[in-house]
Each structure stands twice: as C-alpha cells, then as structure tokens.
Image (spheres, coloured by chain):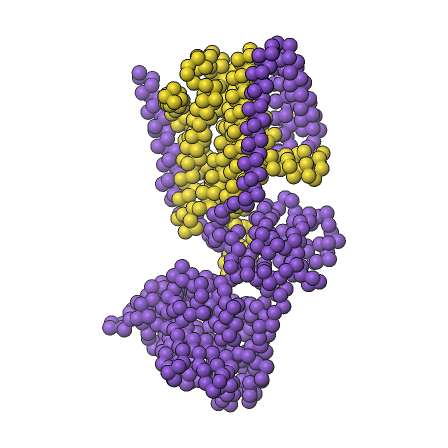
Chain colours: A yellow, B purple
Amino acid sequence: MNALRALLRKELASLFGSPTAYLTLMLVALVTALIFFDHLRLYNQILFVYASSNMGGFDTDTIPDYVNLWDTVFFPVMETLGLTLIGAVPLLTMRAFAEERARGTDELLVTTSLSPGQIVVAKFAVAFLFVTAMMAVSFVYPASAIERGGLGAEHLAAVFLGLTLHGIGVASIGLACSAFTSSQLVAAVSGWAVAFVLWDFSWLQPFVGESAARTLELLSLHPRYGSFSEGIVALDNVAYFGALALVSMALARFSFDLRRVGS
Amino acid sequence: MRELAWIGCVAILFGLLSFYATDHLGVFGAVNLAGGGLALVLALAIAARLMRRVAGPHARGVIARGLLGIAVALGLGVACERAAHWSELRTDWTFERRYELSPALAELLHEVPGLRILHFYDPADPRVRRTKLLIDELVRASGAQSVAYDVQSVPDEAERYGVNSSNTIVLQLGDDYEVVERPLEGAIYEAVYRLRKVKSGVIGLLRGEGEGDPERETAQGFGGLAAALATEGYELRSLVTLSLREVPAEIDAILAISPQRQIGERAEDALRRFLARGGALIALLEPGVDSGLETLLGEWGISAPDELVIDPAAGEGLGHEPEGVCPLAYNYETHAITRGLDRNRMTFFCGVRPFDLRKPEVDDELTAVVLSSPRAWRTSDRSRLTRPAPEPEGVERGYQAIAASGRYRRDGVETRIFAVGDSDFASNRYLRSLYNLDLIMNGVHWALARDPQIALRPKIRDTVQFPLPVQNSLELLYGVGLLVPELLLLAGGTLWLRQRAA
C-alpha cells in the first residue's frame, strides 16, 4: 500500500511539477471560455433579432424553438470541446507508459513491491485526476455566465460532467495505447485512431443491419456523452465510461504480461 | 508487423477524419478505412503467429490469464452498463426539470389507455434528441406505444397526418389524433386533453359592454384563455348583456372579463337569479370601472372599492409601467384554487383593484386567495397606472386581496364565485407568464366544482429562450474567464523559472 501511495505521489509530482500541466490547463480553460462566450454572443444576437419589435417581441411565438441555450450554446460547445479532448488527451497520456518503456524504467517499477495492476491503477488515477482538473477549471467561466443569467448552473454541470467522463474515456484509450508501445508518437496516433473509431459508428451504418447499427450506437462515445448535453445524467451512460476505463485498465495490465513473456 | 499496425492506425485515422469532415464516406475515406482495417488485421495475425512460435507453455498460460482478465473486465463492464440501463436510473438536471413529467400530465396519461405516439423526425435535426427523451418519459408514465419515422422516408404517413416538418409528434387515440409541432410537455398536455374529449361544462361569456375579446389573438385579446378553456373541455357561449333576460339553464358558469360599461339592470337581475339558483361566476374586474358587477359581488360579500393596489415590492412592470402598479404575487391562502402555488410560483397582475371581504351569512366561506406583499397600499389616484408619482405620506400598508373566492350554501344549492381585481393577467400578453394560466384555470375549475381538474399545468414555453445579456457575459469573461487562465499561466511560469534556477 505504501509503495502504491509513493507511486501515486511520484506520478502526481511529476505531472503537477511540470509547467506543461499548467500550460495545458490554461489553454483548455482559455479555449473553453472563448468558445463559450462566442456561442453565448451568437445566441443573444439571434434571440434579439427575433425579439425585435418588427418580429413580434418575446411575448409571441416568433422565436423558433431551435434558438435556445441547448442547441445554440450547450450542444455546439460540447461538440467542439469533445473533439478538442480527443485531440488533446492522447497527447497528455502518450507518455504515461511509453516513456517508461522507452527508458526501461518500467522494469524497475515491476521489481518494486508493486504489482502490475497497482502500477496501472496509479497511472490511470493520475490521468483521470488531471482530466477532471482540466474540466473543473474550464467550468468556472461558463458556470458564472449562466448563473449570472439567473438560470442556475445545474444543467451546465451535467454538460461538464459528460465532458469529464468523455475525457476520462479518451484518457483510458490513450493510456491503453501507450501501454503497448515504447514510442510516444505511436501511442498518440493509435489513441486518436481508436478514439475516432469509437467516437461514432455512423460511418458503418450503410453497411450493417438495423440491429447491428443499434448495437454499434451503444458502443459509441458520441451518443453517450451527447445525452449529458440534454441535462440528463443517466446511470447507464456513467457505467459505459466506467466500463471503458475498466477494459482499458485490463488491456494495460495485459501489456505487462506480454512484456513478461518477452513478446 | 509494427509497420503494418502503424499504417493501419494512420489510415483509419485519416479515413475517419475525412468522413467526419465531409459527413459522407467518399472514395478517400472508404479506401483508407478498408486498407487500414486490413493492415490491422494482418498485423494482428502476424502478432498471433509470432506469439505462438515464441511462447512456451508457461508463457501461453500467462497470456491466457491476461486475456481472461480482459474478458472478465469486458463482461463486468457490459453487465454493469446493462444493469444500469435496465434500472432506468437517471436524474434530470435541466432548468425546469423538463424530463420529469408534471403530476398533471402523468395523471392525464392514465386516463387515455391505448395512446400511440408517432414521432416524425429528420435524423440531422438536433431537437430530436430531447424529444426522444421526452417520449421515453411519456411511454414510461403511460405505457403508450411509440413509433419513430424518418420524415423523408415515409411521405405517405406524414401526409396522412398533415406532418410537414421534422420533430413533430402525432398523438393517436383510436381514430382521433392530434399533431404537436413543438413537442414540449405543455403542448403535449393540451393535445392529450383535447383527445380525451371531456365535457367539463358550458360557460356563458358576457359580451357587448366592452369586455375582453375571447376571439382576439393580439396581446390585449383573450384568445389564449378561450383556447385553454376549450382544451380543458369547456364550451363557451356568448351572452349579450343588452338582450340578457335570463341565463339559459344549460349554462354552468358566467365569465365576465372586465365589462367597461354598465351591464344594465336587467342583466344584473338575470345574473342575480342565476347565482341564487346555484350558478357560478368568474369575474375579472379592472380599477376605475363601475359595470354593475361590483354591486353584485358586494351583495355576496366581495366588495371591490374603486381603488388601485400599489405594491412597492413589485418594481417596474414588463411594459415599463410605473413602479408598484404591477404586483408580482406570491402570497396565497390555502385553497383549492391555489393548490400547488407557493412563494416560488408567482402570478403577475397589472393594475389591480383590491377586495374587501365580509361574510353575508355565518356559514359562507370567503377567502382572499391571492394577496399582495405586506408593503402594499391602496390609492384612488388612477393616474398612477400610467404616470409615476411619489408615495404619499402616512399610507396604510398591508396585504391586499387581489383575488377572492366565495362559497355559499343557500336553500339546498351551492353558489361559487371567483373574482380577480385584474383582467390583464389572463390576457394573451400575460396568460402564459409565470403561473397566471394555472390561477385562472384552477379558478374556473373550482367555480364549476371540478376540483379534480385543478393542477399545475406544464409550461408550453421554454425558459432556455431567455436572453443572457452579452454585457454581463463580457464582464465575466474579463473577470473570471480570463482570470483563471492567467492564474494558471502565472503558476506554470513561476514553477518553470524556479526549476531553471535550481
């Protein structure tokens, strides 16, 4: 247990002791704030065009129902940030195992009292913590803007919970890919490829039957985290991301077995 | 093997990127995906062969255990996800809890067994996601059957129901159906109500003395109220006061929307006889008018002095009326009419006449159902409705009755009266504001002794169409939105400088 704690501390120190972590957090918070503000501005602009006196004002039904905070702000922001996370997170996780493997320090880790499973848990936990921190700092501005508008930040919290889980899912994929290679570049590219394959299986729909399409949809990242943008926190969607993390951990653990048998 | 895997990953990545960028699988995307998939399969096959050649029995055991671990993790993950799916556990974090059906709709759905919900949608329409979620809730609450159609692929079905846009739902009960083009809970509630075809009663509408017009659809009209009454099963019949000798026997209640002139003695007498034989009256008054209804109400213990309620707690009106003349009421007496209304469920009035209540007989039940804030006061200066004026000294403050109800049992019959000191609150302009619709509809249901129909109706408008002023968002962007990244950059930079110095 002490060794696991020491490993966790080491991983955290190496992550938060590096300026890169702060730079990443800063960039994500800044990009989120700018994207969110831009969508909010656009939403208000459209709303005021429809609400202008010659269109009938707010009291009439002239404002189309697609002009609303969900479709004009929350959903597009979530889409953009979701794709941004797919792009950024594998870059953060590519080092986790691949670098240790390239330097040979993974052999040293295995010789400590730590089991491969514990090593995997520690690496995954730190990555998840970083993704959560990233989404937490990004949440501050959008939440203040919505709260100030008097709408309460609960719905937005659901959006960011979805994004955090999506980030954790992508981090799991990235870490699993990193565990199978000693090249950071290969880890990042394979992380992107797997995440994009899992993102949305709609490209396969023309080639498969309806029931297969429905099953593939269940496996997709996009509809899972997309439902959070509706303000619905469903246990099956949370469980999906948990399952993704669990399977990725098992795969990363398997990479240690492969190393052991020398293949 | 590694090269093949690398080629496979890159090809799949670019194939998918091209698909997401163009939204269709062109030659470039298809070739990349097929080639990438093939390369990965080949790489895996080579890896498997290598493994078989290299690995001894012990190694095979280790690998088998590892693969078993993956299979167990996969099985556990799938089982957890499926169990969570079947548990149907989910919470609604939306602003107005839009996916939790209101008790009124949930109750109504139980009264329409055999309901079918047909959803016509365009797959690219973003609104479809939330309509599907709402339909799931409806199905869960009612056991209704639901069918979804891609609107493009079933033109005949769409034409049959007159559907011409995506995200339209059709509620079908037997041979009857209702088309809901903006499927929000409120609109669905009204459509189900219409399908039920319940006859709630006949309401006589006083006409001819400048009353509010139930056929007018402009902001000042009362077309919205007439539609809401029709939806909930009331038949409206016009009663012209000038020719009113006797209220017809089939009329259950009289609705008077602020007559602007005297209704005349004969009409007054007819109403008097109607009330004496157990009829119901819903009277919406306005300050500064003496129509004769005030006298009639006075006889039943609801006197309406010709004054105006000024409530400083209200602030300015929505149409920039002077401060205090448009009370925002949140004080309700416990009464069937105000069931479900509380301090957070406000009603909005503009230019209100107060009531004083005095029981004509000891067994009568008189209630001031809606009250102003305790800071309110009365004035007979009606110019305050349009012109701001300073508050006079020594005004007597206190709760003012904005709406009142009376229940009288005489000679074996029961008479019910619901009176409101304002009619604008039920006009098209304000009917859907806050809980105004609920107050007037519940007042009507109560007056006609249809208490089970009293409920808080789901809203047909979306709160998410409220504007969020850009200026506020901009101030926050400079204040909070840029401050957080700045602090993070400062922390990162300081750390880097310290590491360099060390």
At horizontal 65% and vertical 44% (from top left) the residue drawn is B123
Judging depth in this view, the residue of B63 and B354 nearest the camera is B63
Which residue of the protein is positioned furthest toward the right in this rendering? B156
Judging depth in this view, the residue of B371 and B265 nearest the camera is B371
Q: Is residue B190 visible?
A: yes
Work out which quarter of the rendered image holds the N terminus of chain A and state it. top left
Q: Is residue B366 left or right of residue B267?
A: left
Which residue of the protein is positioned furthest toward the left in this rendering? B394
Residue B112 sits in quarter: bottom right
Query: Is B69 above or below relative to B2?
Result: below
Judging depth in this view, the residue of A145 and B248 nearest the camera is B248
Query: Is A223 above or below relative to A46?
Result: above
| Residue B163 x %, y % | 68, 56
| Residue B495 x %, y % | 34, 23
| Residue A101 x %, y % | 49, 14
| Residue B206 x %, y % | 53, 80
